[in-house]
Every structure is written in C-alpha cells, then in structure tokens.
Image (cartoon, rainbow, N blue to C red):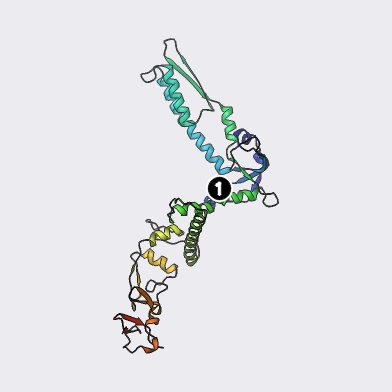
Amino acid sequence: MAKIPHRLFAGLDRSQARLVDYTAERDTGKPPGQRGQYRVLEDTQTLAGPRKRDPQLTVRRILVHSSANAAAQQAARNRRLEQAREELDKLQHSCGGRHYATAAKVTARIGVITSKRRIVSCLVTSVGTDEAGRPTLAWHFDQKVLAREAAADGWHALLTTLDAAEADAADILVRYKGQPVVERRRYRDFKGPLAVAPVLLHHNRRITALITVICLTLLVLCLIERQVRQALGGNQTMRGLYPDNRAARPTGRMILYHLDSLRIRAGTAIDPPTILITRAVQAHLIELLGIDETRPAGWTPQTRCAKSGSRLWPVSHLVPADKIAAPVNPDGYASVRSAGGLFVFAAPPV
C-alpha cells in the first residue's frame, strides 16, 4: 500500500471508478445491499531512489475506494469532532477561571485538545482578552477542510510492477486482499502455535536449514488442520473448542492447544502404549485425525527391541521365530529367555 497525499484522493471522481466483483469476508453473511463495495482507478507513479544517481522506477498505481472504509472514516471523524466540540465549549466557558486564568494556559489546553482529537488541520481558534483582562476564546471548524477530508475518505493506493496483461486493476486488488492468508500462515503461526523464537545463526547454510525445518513444521500444522476440516465435512465446524461451546472451524492453533495436554502410557512388548484422553474434545479430534488411541501408529510386536548390553537389537535378530519353544500367551506372542539372561519377546511362528 502506498502513501498518497489526501489532496490527490480528494480530486478523484468515484463515479468514474470501475466496480470490482469482490466481497469482503466480514460481509459474506450480509444482504447484498449492506455489503461494502470496491472501485478502482489506475494510473502510474514514478519512484525515485534515495540517491540522486539512482534510476527512477515507474510503476502502476491502483487507486482503490472502499465504501466500508469511507463510512468508518466518516464515523470516526464525527466522533472526534463531537468530542473536541464538547471539550472546546467547556474550555470556552472556563476561560478566566481558576484553571485557565491566562491566555497562555488557554492556548496550551487548545494544543492538547487538537493533538488528542487530531483536528489540527480543521480547527480555527482565536485567543484574546476582554476589558477586565480575562482570556477569551473563539473557535470554529473549517468546513472546506472537512469537505476535502470527506472527499478522500475510503481511498487508498496500491503499487505494483505486474504488467496489465498479467493482472488488471481489479485482479491486483483481489490479490492484495489475499495477503492476510499468507501472512497468517507465515507470521502468526510461526510465533503462535509453532513458537519459533529468534535464533542467532552465523552461516547461511544454517539459516537455510532453519527455514526448511520451520516450513516443514508449518506444512505439518496445515495438514493437521486440513485433515480435521475434511473429516468434519459440511460447514467444517465443531463444538468444544471454546469455553462457550459455540460452533467454530478448527484451526491448527486450537487443535494443538487441546491436544497439548495429552499423555501416553508406556507400553510393553505385548501391551501397546495407550493415549490417555481426559476431555471429550480430545477424543473427537483424535477420531477426526484417524488415530487409534489404543494402538499408536508405528507399534508392532515384530519391531520391539530387547536390550543386550549397551546396544539395541531387533527381537527377530535375537530369537529366530521358527525356534521359539515356549508357551504362547493369550495375546498370541511367545516369551523366551536368551543366553544373556534377558527376556526377549517375539511373534510366534506362522
């Protein structure tokens, strides 16, 4: 978004702007007549570098008008003017009193009001003294200035280097409106559920490696969110994520928040580890993710290991399955004692 003087916006003709077929997310549930509208105009702007010898760059400038932003800016201005009007009237009646006995104090108070209410450009004041030497105050708002500010309401500018053949003015606006989705994934999730902290790295290859790990983590977070929403189907909402039990679309952040308190009970060679669930929402999320809490993925008796000295060996390497000569337990696995004095568990011969 480019910063453009208000006088340029005040001179634009909104009726000449092209209407864009775009609806803000906040307006999707409103009737068509109550939704905000966007209009665009296009021209060019030349940018100069910080040094005189830097080449100039001419880019496309998209002038965007938002009816919702215009209404919000007008309402905010009216509130500021009303608050300033009350404070100035009070100051006018207090001139010559105990707190504002001199013109300097009245002038200082005017400076505080204009700065706080941001009305420096439109406020006209005159501070004097009466026959008794008491300070007086006369003030009014410059209506011409207010009219120019109102004419610039709702306008902002976008600069782009994209060619017109690649994207027209309306397409540039739609692409710009899609930025929050990328920023939410890139920045908010990095510092939120992923809890990425600043790290001082001395080599470019380590920076590249860290970015790769972060992107892989972000990919896993997105896949978790996608899996849950696809499993929900329909409007992709569920209850239990928030204390008020309202229906909401699960996000990766909320999914990790509820699954963070899960605990796992350690298993044995014949008894798999089990996920301990304490809340109903955890059970629902695990079901949506397709996880069997009684048999976490990756556990099979054939892959269990027995410790021999300081090394870990697969059971199948210690005891050949066809030489097991021990009673089979109810779970279908046999146990034998190895030469080293350790109990080793292996699957019975098929």
Please provide percent x and percent y for residue 84: 46, 29
Q: Is residue 291 above or below residue 133?
A: below
Q: Residues within 10 Å of mark 1 (few under 14, many from 20)?
A: few
Instruction: Give the residue drawn at x 38%, y 80%.
Output: 315
Q: Is residue 252 visible?
A: yes
Figure disc tally: 1
Rendered image quadrant of residue 331: bottom left
Residue that protrudes farthest toward the top in the picture:
131
Rendered image quadrant of residue 344: bottom left
Horizontal arrangement in the rendering, residue 86 relative to residue 37 (left or right)? left
Q: Is residue 132 above or below residue 188?
A: above
Instruction: Give the residue drawn at x 33%, y 89%.
Output: 325
Q: Is residue 228 above or below residue 191?
A: below
Under mark 1, the amino acid is: Gln
Q: Is residue 29 visible?
A: no
Question: In the image shown, does 333 or 245 lie closer to the viewer?
Answer: 333
Horizontal arrangement in the rendering, residue 264 relative to residue 210 (left or right)? left
Residue that protrudes farthest toward the left in the picture:
341
Question: In the image shown, does 227 or 208 lie closer to the viewer?
Answer: 208
Rendered image quadrant of residue 345: bottom left
Report the quarter where the N terminus lies.
Answer: top right
Horizontal arrangement in the rendering, residue 346 relative to residue 29 (left or right)? left
Please provide percent x and percent y for residue 286: 41, 67
Instruction: Give the residue drawn at x 56%, y 30%.
Output: 146
Report helix, strand or loop for mark 1. helix
The residue at which mark 1 appears reads as 34
Please provide percent x and percent y for residue 340: 30, 81
Report the quarter where the C terminus lies.
Answer: bottom left
